[in-house]
Image (cartoon, rainbow, N blue to C red):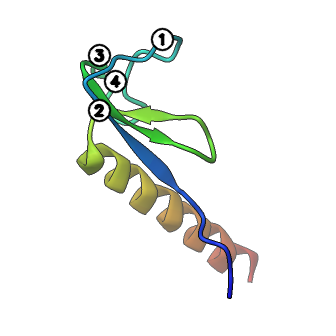
């Protein structure tokens, strides 16, 4: 059995203590509650921005692999 990997943490009722204080996707100021991506340390204002950012990263990786082929 493989170990579970935590990709993100939803933080409720808190603002970040240290930079970045803005969403990595839309650049909105992070208020009381945000999504913290564990692997990169990036912070997002909500799950919509986190999901959009994930899709963009996957698209870029797929594009690069097609160009390399």
Q: Give the numbered dot on residue 26.
A: none
Nearest to viewer (mark 2 / mark 4): 2
Q: Residue at x 26, y 40 (%)?
A: 46
**How many residues crowd mark 3 within 10 Å: few (<14), some (14–19), many (20+)?**
few
Can you say whether 58 is above or below 65 in the image?
A: above
Looking at the image, is mark 2 or mark 3 earlier in the sequence?
Answer: 3
Please identify the quarter of the rendering in which residue 26 is found.
Answer: top left
Residue at figure coordinates x 53%, y 11% from the top left: 18
**Residue under pointer 4:** 27
Closer to the chain start, of discs 1 and 2, is 1
- Above or below for 54 versus 3: above
* In the depicted structure, whether residue 1 falls above or below residue 60: below
Left or right placement of residue 36 versus residue 45 in this view: right
Q: Which residue is mark 2?
A: 45
Helix, strand or loop at mark 2: loop
Q: CA distance from mark 2 to mark 4?
A: 9 Å
Structural distance between the alpha carbons of marks 2 and 3: 8 Å
The answer for how far apart the CA atoms under marks 1 and 2 are is 15 Å
């Amino acid at each position: 059995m493989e170990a579970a990997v935590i990709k993100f943490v939803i933080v409720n009722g808190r603002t970040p203590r240290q930079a970045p204080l803005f969403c990595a996707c839309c650049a909105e100021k992070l208020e009381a509650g945000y999504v913290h991506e564990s692997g990169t340390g990036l912070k997002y204002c909500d799950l919509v921005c986190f999901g959009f950012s994930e899709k963009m990263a996957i698209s870029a990786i797929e594009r690069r692999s097609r160009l390399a082929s």
